[in-house]
Image (cartoon, coloured by chain):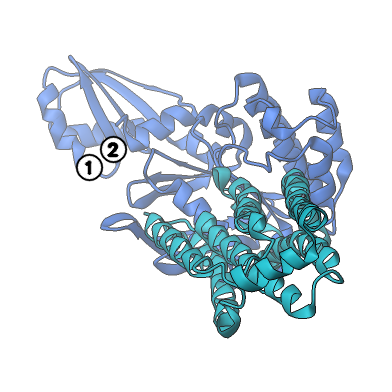
Chain colours: A cyan, B blue
């Protein structure tokens, strides 16, 4: 069951994944090159002072990319399923429907994780060593709400695209916008330290919506 | 004969618009059954219920003895589904889509699929999104044949096809179903195709089934009667008669359809005191029978 469904998801998403991977890795590498250039021009001491005094994080270029990648993967994965109601073909496969949806979402999660992990490793690999651990944590703590926003965007856009009724679709779109606003409220380091569990809970809640959309599609809800 | 599809007391409506109430029908094993009905009589609704994409408001629908709504996933491997418009995954090529489905179905036979593709002279690398509607219909049919299901459910299989592709589709399907003893449930708005293909037909009118019987029997027993009368306005006396279907007048000429014999019709006309001349009956084809039973509009 997993193999054919992963094959289908790969067929839909491979070109976008390549693009997303290149952009994320490229921008993360560029941000780190800017950091290395600043170190060579003004010295490490100056940079450390900037980071301490102005809470500079060195990763701001990456801010909106995880959301873009999450949104993009959801679109390239599920718009073709809804085109001419192709989803009927997927739901007619001899697999348990809830598991099929789970496998499709698992593909998205896996690909997002790979993309975000590559970007994270570039940042971590470059900053680990030159920066003291407190300042390294400061930069990384700014990154993770953005990655979380990418997962949230992925689940919400998936549910919105899979939704057969306009009422729920508009509702989901509004929740997506408001939810993403929460994830992007602050760029300050450690701003989300006390909000980590809430962010995870929001992502888990968002992940359940796709099943509900598919259930409504399956039983024939329409406007 | 074992029933592959059993629908009992199906009732469905969209909002306040009742599509049908207490609909009952069965499809026996090894038969090709065509569902005929005008637009809006509930053909697609029935197909959606049968393929599990619509929950009826009441009633049950069983396939292979299992309720469709709670059917085990593995049983779907035995049902080939053709969605209206020959929809298939547009992002795949001929080769990729075969590779994908072959991993899903245990009884997969790629030979009939590639045989059909070779007949169409389409390259394995050709993307489905770049194919014509006719070519896509053959891809969809080839995939169903390769799946080798016991039951085929085909929604408006002739939609968008030119006569050549329609004939190819019908001939391939009829040959496959009869040689492999498959059960087929289908709809089409082109009734000539149905006549070439189906063993039995269900004719639906708004809210109900008018009849379900073998096409051969239907065409043997239904007659189109024509006669002339000076009292065309008196035809209204026949309209409510449930043995005479859709009497229509054009000048002095009257046309109606009935399962009555000529003698029985003569007696009925006598009973309602209608004078007539030149009474004749003609053999009808399935399209005539359908229009005769359901009316032109």
Q: Is residue B273 above or below residue B149?
A: above
Q: In the image, which disc is placed on residue B244?
A: 2
Q: Position of residue A117 (x, y in %)?
A: 78, 65
* Residue A102 image point, x, y percent: 68, 68
Residue situated in front as seen by the camera: A11 or A180: A180
Residue A134: x and y in percent read 73, 80
Q: Residue at x 10, y 25 (%)?
A: B233
- What chain is tagged by disc 2? B
Q: Is residue B248 above or below residue A212?
A: above
**Tag 2: Cα neighbours inside 10 Å, few (<14), some, or many (≥20)?**
some
Separation of disc 1 and disc 2 at Cα? Answer: 6 Å
Crowd around label 1: few <14 · some 14–19 · many ≥20 (10 Å): few
Image coordinates for residue B219, horizontal then vertical, percent: 49, 34
Q: Which residue is mark 1?
A: B241
- Quarter of the image for residue B221 reads top left
Q: Could you tell me which residue is drawn at 79 percent across and 29 percent down?
A: B126
Q: Is residue A32 left or right of residue B87?
A: right
Q: Are marks 1 and 2 in contact (CB under 8 Å)?
A: yes
State the residue at coordinates (52%, 69%).
A186
Residue nearest the viewer, comparing B292 with B104: B104
């Amino acid at each position: 069951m997993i193999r054919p469904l992963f094959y289908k998801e790969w067929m839909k998403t491979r070109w976008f994944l390549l693009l997303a991977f290149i952009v994320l890795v490229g921008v993360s590498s560029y941000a780190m090159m800017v950091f290395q250039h600043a170190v060579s021009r003004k010295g490490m001491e100056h940079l450390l002072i900037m980071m301490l005094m102005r809470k500079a994080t060195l990763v701001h270029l990456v801010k909106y990319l995880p959301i873009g990648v999450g949104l993009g993967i959801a679109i390239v994965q599920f718009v073709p399923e809804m085109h001419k109601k192709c989803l009927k073909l997927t739901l007619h496969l001899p697999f348990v429907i809830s598991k099929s949806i789970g496998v499709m979402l698992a593909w998205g999660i896996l690909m997002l994780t790979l993309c975000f992990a590559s970007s994270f490793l570039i940042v971590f690999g470059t900053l680990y060593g030159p920066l003291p651990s407190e300042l390294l944590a400061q930069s990384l703590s700014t990154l993770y709400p953005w990655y979380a926003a990418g997962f949230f965007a992925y689940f919400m856009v998936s549910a919105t695209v899979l939704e057969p009724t306009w009422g729920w679709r508009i509702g989901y779109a509004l929740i997506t916008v408001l939810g993403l606003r929460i994830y992007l409220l602050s760029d300050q380091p450690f701003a989300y330290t006390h909000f980590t569990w809430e962010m995870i809970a929001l992502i888990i809640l968002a992940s359940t919506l796709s099943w509900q959309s598919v259930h409504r599609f399956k039983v024939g809800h329409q406007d | 004969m074992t029933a592959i599809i059993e629908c009992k007391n199906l009732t469905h409506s969209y909002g306040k618009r009742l599509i049908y109430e207490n609909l009952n029908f069965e499809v026996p094993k090894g038969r090709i059954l065509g569902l005929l009905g005008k637009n809006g009589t509930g053909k697609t609704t029935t197909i959606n219920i049968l393929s599990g994409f619509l929950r009826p408001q009441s009633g049950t629908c069983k396939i292979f003895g299992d309720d469709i709504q709670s059917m085990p996933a593995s049983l779907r491997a035995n049902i080939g589904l053709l969605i209206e418009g020959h929809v298939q995954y547009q992002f795949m090529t001929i080769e990729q889509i075969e590779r994908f489905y072959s991993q899903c179905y245990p009884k997969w036979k790629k030979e009939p699929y590639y045989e059909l593709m070779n007949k169409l002279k389409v390259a394995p690398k050709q993307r489905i999104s770049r194919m014509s509607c006719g070519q896509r219909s053959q891809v969809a049919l080839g995939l169903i044949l390769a799946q080798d299901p016991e039951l085929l459910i085909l929604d408006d299989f002739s939609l968008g096809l030119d006569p050549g592709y329609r004939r190819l589709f019908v001939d391939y399907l009829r040959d496959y179903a009869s040689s492999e003893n498959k059960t087929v449930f289908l709809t089409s708005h082109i009734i000539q195709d149905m006549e070439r293909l189906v063993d039995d037909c269900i004719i639906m009118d708004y809210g109900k089934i008018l009849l379900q019987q073998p096409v051969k029997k239907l065409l043997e027993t239904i007659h189109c009667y024509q006669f002339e009368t000076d009292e065309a306005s008196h035809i209204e006396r026949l309209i409510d008669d449930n043995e005479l279907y859709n009497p229509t007048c054009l000048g002095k000429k009257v046309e109606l359809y009935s399962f009555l014999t000529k003698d029985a019709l003569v007696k009925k006309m006598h009973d309602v005191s209608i004078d007539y001349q030149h009474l004749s009956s003609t053999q009808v084809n399935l399209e005539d029978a359908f229009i005769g039973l359901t009316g032109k509009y």
